[in-house]
Image: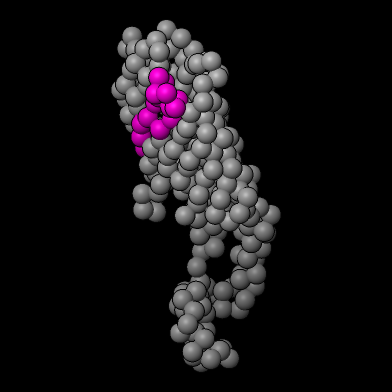
Amino acid sequence: MIHFPTRIIKYCLPIFFACLPWAANGETPPETSGIDIKPEIIEGSPVLQRWLQEVPNVLEDIDRDPSFRTRLRLGYSQFPSAGQAPGWNAGAEDVFIGRTGMTVSADYQGTFDGKRKGYGADLRYYLLPLGGYINVAPVLGYRHLETNLYSTDGVNVGARLLLVPSRGGGGDIALTQSWVSPGSAQEVGLTTLSFGYAITPYLRLSTDIQQQNSIQAQDSRVGIVVEWMP
């Protein structure tokens, strides 16, 4: 939920530290004996200990700190193409694998009567610095889709565009285009547009709009989701 403060920090901190005598000379910070800080304060502050040992690269830290967060999702779905049938959805979005740009996502959505459903899991690899306001990721995974007219499953391949106007999970817009079982007679195209906005530091409301295109039919889904950010 940080926007302007992050930008100020990103551009002003390096200038500030470059003006310090020891930073300008490329030296490490002075020993604690030259700073009037009580030893117990230093011992109780890992951040201060780190800065006293070596000046961190603030710009690099900001770029590596993800501007978006892992979300656990649960919500209500409606299927306009199935006579406005009600349903539900659940999943996990962008579970990071270590400190890399790779994430795992999984989801389920379906009508309460079970006549339409879809589920799957994907790997995404974000190509741009994680701390940026825009990112793109190829998508590779597996998906199963089931409607009144057809059922298909297979490899899910596509791409995701992520816009983050408010960092730290405060708000983002995501557009994902993928194809299930591409190149086969059962190929299905999935277009998903999501909007999310935080209402507390750990909770968000999100809206999903999905279009599902196959040779047999065109289907649609709209979802209202509550997201928890651990």
Q: How is the image coloured?
A: one colour
Percent from the top left, x then y, of residue 185?
33, 9
Within the image, what quadrant is residue 19 found in?
A: bottom right
Is 82 placed left or right of 5 in the picture? left
* Residue 222 at x, y percent in the picture: 55, 27
As rendered, which of 28 and 193 lies closer to the eye? 193
Residue in the image at 64% along x and 61% along y: 9
Q: Compared with residue 106, is residue 217 higher up or lower down, i.e. above or below?
A: above
Region in magenta:
108-124
The x and y percentages for residue 107 are 41, 35
Residue 43 figure quarter: bottom left
The residue at the point 52 percent across, 86 percent down is 41
Left or right: 9 in relation to 80: right
Please, is residue 199 above or below residue 48 in the view? Answer: above
How many circles with numbers are drawn on the protein?
0
Image point 63% across, 50% down: which residue? 199
Residue at horizontal 56%, vertical 50%? 203
Query: Hey, which quadrant is residue 84 in on the image?
Result: top right
Please name whichever residue, 3 or 153, is drawn nearer the observer in this view of the structure: 153
Residue 165 point in image, percent of width and height: 64, 44
- Residue at the extreme front: 113
